[in-house]
Amino acid sequence: MKKKLSSRKLWLAIIGFVSAMCVVFGVEDIKIEQICALIGALGTLIAYIFAEGISDASGKTSEKTDTPPSDLGQSSPNNEEK
Protein backbone atom coordinates (compact mmCIF):
# COMPACT_ATOMS: atom_id res chain seq x y z
CA MET A 1 0.00 0.00 0.00
CA LYS A 2 2.87 2.37 0.82
CA LYS A 3 4.40 1.84 -2.62
CA LYS A 4 1.10 2.61 -4.31
CA LEU A 5 0.53 5.83 -2.35
CA SER A 6 4.03 7.07 -3.11
CA SER A 7 3.77 6.20 -6.82
CA ARG A 8 4.01 9.16 -9.18
CA LYS A 9 1.92 7.29 -11.72
CA LEU A 10 -0.94 6.98 -9.23
CA TRP A 11 -0.90 10.71 -8.40
CA LEU A 12 -0.75 11.66 -12.07
CA ALA A 13 -3.69 9.36 -12.76
CA ILE A 14 -5.62 10.99 -9.90
CA ILE A 15 -4.82 14.46 -11.23
CA GLY A 16 -5.90 13.42 -14.72
CA PHE A 17 -9.17 11.97 -13.44
CA VAL A 18 -10.02 14.92 -11.21
CA SER A 19 -9.17 17.49 -13.88
CA ALA A 20 -11.35 15.62 -16.41
CA MET A 21 -14.23 15.54 -13.93
CA CYS A 22 -13.81 19.26 -13.30
CA VAL A 23 -14.06 19.94 -17.03
CA VAL A 24 -17.16 17.75 -17.28
CA PHE A 25 -18.86 19.65 -14.46
CA GLY A 26 -17.90 23.07 -15.84
CA VAL A 27 -15.38 24.17 -13.21
CA GLU A 28 -13.40 27.29 -14.15
CA ASP A 29 -9.91 26.76 -15.55
CA ILE A 30 -8.18 28.56 -12.68
CA LYS A 31 -9.96 26.35 -10.15
CA ILE A 32 -8.92 23.23 -12.06
CA GLU A 33 -5.30 24.38 -11.95
CA GLN A 34 -5.52 25.03 -8.22
CA ILE A 35 -7.09 21.64 -7.56
CA CYS A 36 -4.43 19.85 -9.63
CA ALA A 37 -1.66 21.74 -7.85
CA LEU A 38 -3.14 20.78 -4.48
CA ILE A 39 -3.35 17.09 -5.41
CA GLY A 40 0.22 17.17 -6.76
CA ALA A 41 1.48 18.77 -3.55
CA LEU A 42 -0.36 16.19 -1.47
CA GLY A 43 1.15 13.34 -3.50
CA THR A 44 4.63 14.80 -3.11
CA LEU A 45 4.17 15.15 0.64
CA ILE A 46 2.93 11.57 1.03
CA ALA A 47 5.81 10.20 -1.05
CA TYR A 48 8.31 12.17 1.03
CA ILE A 49 6.84 10.95 4.32
CA PHE A 50 6.96 7.31 3.20
CA ALA A 51 10.50 7.67 1.83
CA GLU A 52 11.74 9.21 5.08
CA GLY A 53 9.99 6.53 7.10
CA ILE A 54 11.64 3.78 5.08
CA SER A 55 15.00 5.53 5.29
CA ASP A 56 14.71 5.98 9.05
CA ALA A 57 13.63 2.37 9.57
CA SER A 58 16.55 0.98 7.60
CA GLY A 59 19.02 3.39 9.22
CA LYS A 60 18.15 2.36 12.77
CA THR A 61 18.89 -1.31 12.16
CA SER A 62 22.40 -0.67 10.83
CA GLU A 63 23.35 2.34 12.93
CA LYS A 64 27.01 2.43 13.98
CA THR A 65 28.21 3.66 17.34
CA ASP A 66 30.81 6.40 17.60
CA THR A 67 33.18 4.84 20.10
CA PRO A 68 36.83 5.83 20.05
CA PRO A 69 39.37 3.14 19.22
CA SER A 70 40.84 1.39 22.24
CA ASP A 71 44.44 1.65 21.04
CA LEU A 72 44.81 5.45 21.12
CA GLY A 73 48.39 6.51 21.64
CA GLN A 74 49.84 3.17 20.58
CA SER A 75 51.76 2.74 17.37
CA SER A 76 50.07 0.92 14.58
CA PRO A 77 51.80 -1.68 12.41
CA ASN A 78 51.72 0.72 9.47
CA ASN A 79 53.61 3.47 11.36
CA GLU A 80 56.52 1.40 12.73
CA GLU A 81 59.82 3.22 13.17
CA LYS A 82 62.77 1.91 11.14
Image (tube, grey):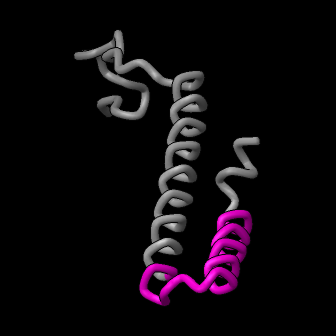
Q: Would residue 9 appear left or right of 48 to someone viewing this image?
A: right
Q: Is residue 22 magenta?
A: yes
The residue at the far bottom in this view is 29
In the displayed structure, would residue 41 be above or below residue 77? below
Q: Quick one: 58 or 75, which is closer to the camera?
A: 58
Q: State which quadrant residue 7 falls in.
A: bottom right
Which residue is painted at 23% across and 16% down in the image?
A: 73
* Residue 24: image location, x then y, percent: 69, 84
For the N terminus, the quadrant is top right
In the displayed structure, would residue 10 be above or below residue 25? above
The region drawn magenta spans 8-32
Q: State which quadrant residue 9 falls in.
A: bottom right
Q: Quick one: 13 or 46, which is closer to the camera?
A: 13
* Residue 4: image location, x then y, percent: 75, 51
Q: State which quadrant residue 76 falls in.
A: top left
Q: Would residue 58 appear left or right of 63 to someone viewing this image?
A: right
The residue at the far front in this view is 25
